[in-house]
Image (cartoon, helix red, strand yellow):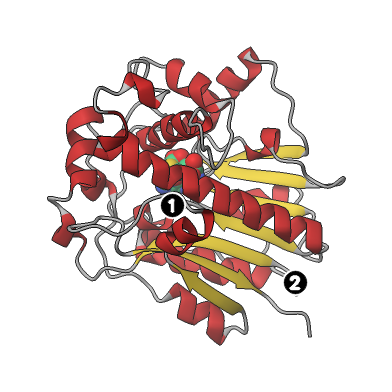
Amino acid sequence: MFGTTPRNTEVEGKQDVEGTEGVEGGVGLTALMVAAARAIETHRHDSLAQDVYAEHFVLATPASADWPVRVQQVPDGEANPLWGRFARYFGLRTRVLDDFLLLSVHTGNARQVVLFGAGLDSRAFRLDWPPGCVIFEIDREGVLAFKHKVLDGLSATPKATRVPIPIDLRADWVGALADAGFDTAAPSVWLAEGLMFYLPAAAETYLIDTVDRLSTEGSALAFEVKVEKDLLEYRDSPLYTSTAQQIGIDLLSLFDREPRPDSVGDLARKGWSTSVRTPFDFTRRHGRGPLPERNDALEGNRWVFANKPRP
Ligand SMILES: C[S@@+](CC[C@H](N)C(=O)[O-])C[C@H]1O[C@@H](n2cnc3c(N)ncnc32)[C@H](O)[C@@H]1O
């Protein structure tokens, strides 16, 4: 154990701890949505990220077996708000965070990587990790069990040591990470991709405080937040309505609606250097990806990159 855990009641929030545990419903289904987006991205002619495992996840469960895994399977193709623009967003996010992770491990000394809410992320299998890397993947038990069933069926081999940690982030994940062999004396790289907005505010605060506590100098963290004051402002946006209508995922009902903590400010006060970017910054850098539009559910999304400087 590394230290104190918040009492479950403080971090439980509105997520249903007893609720759907796997990928077939609730927040777990969002992992399949992102996998479908990555499958589509993989086969775009101007692909930003390649994930050959993604379509296997989507096709492996009745929950998503009839979703598209190629944009050509979508009647209105790239004009479809969900499988066009939103899927491209996930493709861009995958690429940007692939680059963040690879840069962090190849230019620094960190050899342990922690993926919070890893879902169906296959980075342990598809990225070129330096020797000695350990990838800890934290997600709920049902999601990781589904992931393993699919990957085992493909005889997939990780390119680093992979340590799945089946636990809810509202429970004692710190103890589970310690038990799994995380080394607090060594630098680390942390990622919370597509996760914070599902967590109760107290769980986000705890996560940030704990990452700081467990990170030596030379560690790095990236995470995604939404900064709009009122998420419902965009409830009629094409991204939210198409996601609900086409695949039955009501994102706004899954997002935690409490006021969000100032995680960037917290990290800065703890001495981390931080950089806050919009996805559109990276669209411009890569020459492809979503650009701002009216009534845009992506308007408040920010990607945060933080480093704990060496003295
Ligand atoms: C949108 S998916 C993103 C998955 C992955 N990071 C990606 O980008 O492909 C959100 C993931 O967060 C996980 N998640 C949400 N709340 C969680 C919690 N309280 N504890 C553990 N995992 C959680 C879900 O199970 C799901 O796999």
Exactly how many numbered labels are in the figure? 2
Q: Quadrant of residue 147?
A: top right
Q: Who comes first in sequence, dot 1 or dot 2?
A: 1
Viewer-side residue, 56 vs 85: 85
Q: Examine the rendering and report whether any part of residue 308 can be seen.
A: yes
Looking at the figure, which quarter contains the C terminus?
bottom right
Q: Residue at x 83, y 62 (%)?
A: 109
Locate residue 64, reporting x and y percent: 36, 21
Give the residue number, with chain letter if any, for mark 1. Answer: 195
Mark 1: secondary structure: loop
Q: Is residue 50 positioned above or below 103 on the image?
A: above
48 left or right of 254? right
Identify which amino acid the numbered label 1 is placed on. Answer: Leu
At label 1, counting other C-alpha atoms closer than 10 Å, the crowd grade (few under 14, some 14-19, many 20 or more) is some
Q: Quadrant of residue 121?
A: top right
Q: Quadrant of residue 71?
A: top left
Q: Is residue 93 positioned above or below 311 on the image?
A: above
At label 2, counting other C-alpha atoms closer than 10 Å, the crowd grade (few under 14, some 14-19, many 20 or more) is some
